[in-house]
Amino acid sequence: MWPVLLAYYTGVATAAGAMIAWSGNKKVGKRKIILFHQEKPLPSCRALLQKRGGQVLKELPLVHALVARLPAKGKVIEELGLHPDIRLIEDDFEVHTVELPAARIRQEKQIVPWGVERIGAPRAWQVAAGEKVKVAVLDTGLDAGHPDLAANVRGTQNIKFPGWRAGDGNGHGTHVAGIIAALNNSFGVVGVAPRAEIYGVKIFNRQGDGYISDIVAGLDWALKNKMQVVNMSFGTSQPSQALEEAVRKCVQAGMVLVAAAGNEGRDDSVLYPARYPGVIAVSAVDKKDNLASFSSRGTEVTVTAPGVDILSTYPGGKYRTMSGTSMACPHAAGVAALILAQDRRLSGRQVARIICRTAIKLPDLSPREQGDGLVNATALAAVARFIGEMGTAGEESVG
């Protein structure tokens, strides 16, 4: 499996109005996400958990929840599940990226990677190149000093280890960022939107390990800091109510959320959060427009994009090729940045609608494999026309 998150989550049961998800593991102190009713202030919620012997680890204001370790002995979890202030208790399950070794490339004179060329980005730069569009990369961190990224990096945030710099000891996040916005200069590579503003949000450690709560906290940061596009090159086969609520609130706020469909290599296998309504779910194709063998497919796929042997930036000023829907996803995020550079008043749903309506249908792929088609940057000049057509009409749903 290429870069993708694997999750361990065993089920959900209902207990008198509050849902409780558990793993069957009786180990003391297992992490839980406890979602409270909005009218209950989080400080009071914290006191409630502490009174029951819980250790509160962090707050998740976006979904009005706390992350805590709850005693496994006795009936603490069952009793909390019956508490009128609590609406849901679920595992804060651990997730991690799984990658194949990346191929090292010595890159000097600048080239346009095949994926950037295939979606027509160079022709779009005559109209827009992502200027003043804020793109958050939720990932393993970012090499903010990479010479092919530094001028476009506007900030970083370390969710995983607060107070520490958001460096990238893994490489996945830096690679994704380069696909979106590597600089158009005389060396290395160039990204889809080479003038977009990149913000690296570290939600996974150098091994690619993190929790659902880290993803939720990353989305919270993106919303509070007015990110316009959020790239999520990860996924899990198991749902999370907390993550779904976080995604919904970001979509409602007008953000463009783009996520990898997954690397499951079979039908009906699109992962979360790509599976959630409002998210642009991206499958992967190769240089011949064939669906990548590893790519997930299903009715939730929105569009497809290049995702095989993609050359991009890597920590330490290096360049490597990687494959996965993790690489396809930032191609679509880059196109979203190009669209918003023309009109930053567009909502996330409007941007998604434009991406879908301008996508190129690939004749040998089904809708379950490509969604509306190959993401298409060359349609940028037609954005104004689509904006006029949309007018005040209702927005189409995506995802």
Image (tube, rainbow, N blue to C red):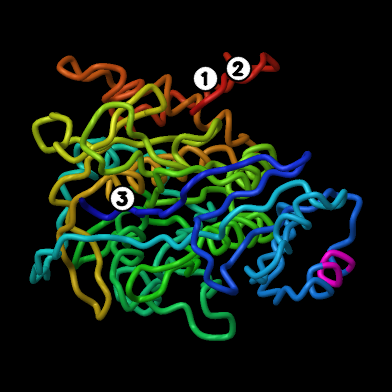
Magenta segment, which residues? Answer: 44-48
Q: Position of residue 66 (x, y in %)?
A: 72, 63
**Residues tagged 2 and 1 counted as in contact (Cβ below 8 A):** yes
Relative to the observer, which residue lies in front, 231 or 57? Answer: 57
Looking at the image, residue 56 lies above or below residue 351: below
**Residue 3 included in the magenta stretch of the image:** no
Quadrant location of residue 317? bottom left
Q: Disc 3 marks which amino acid?
A: Ser
Pointer 2 residue: 390
Which residue is tagged 3?
326
Residue sitting at x 58%, y 67%: 31
Residue depicted at x 8% and y 71%: 106
Numbered disc 1: secondary structure = helix
Residue closer to the observer: 298 or 33 = 33
Nearer to us of marks 1 and 3 is 3
- Is most of the magenta stretch helix, strand or loop? helix
Amino acid at circle 2: Met
Q: Separation of disc 2 and disc 1 at Cα?
A: 6 Å
Q: Is residue 35 above or below residue 51?
A: above
Near mark 1 (Cα within 10 A), the count class, few <14, some 14-19 or many ≥20, is some
- The Cα–Cα distance between marks 3 and 2, rounded to whole angstroms, is 31 Å
Mark 3 vs mark 2: which is more N-terminal? Answer: 3
In the foreground, 342 or 399: 399
Which residue matches tag 1? 386
Indicate the position of residue 380 as horizontal and vertical percent values: 41, 31
Considering only order in the chain, which callout, 3 or 1, is on the residue closer to the N terminus?
3
Which residue is at a point 45% across and 69% down the rendered structure image? 153
Q: Position of residue 78 (x, y in %)?
A: 72, 55
Mark 3: secondary structure = helix
> Distance from label 1 to label 3 (Cα)?
29 Å
Foreground pick, 196 / 256: 256
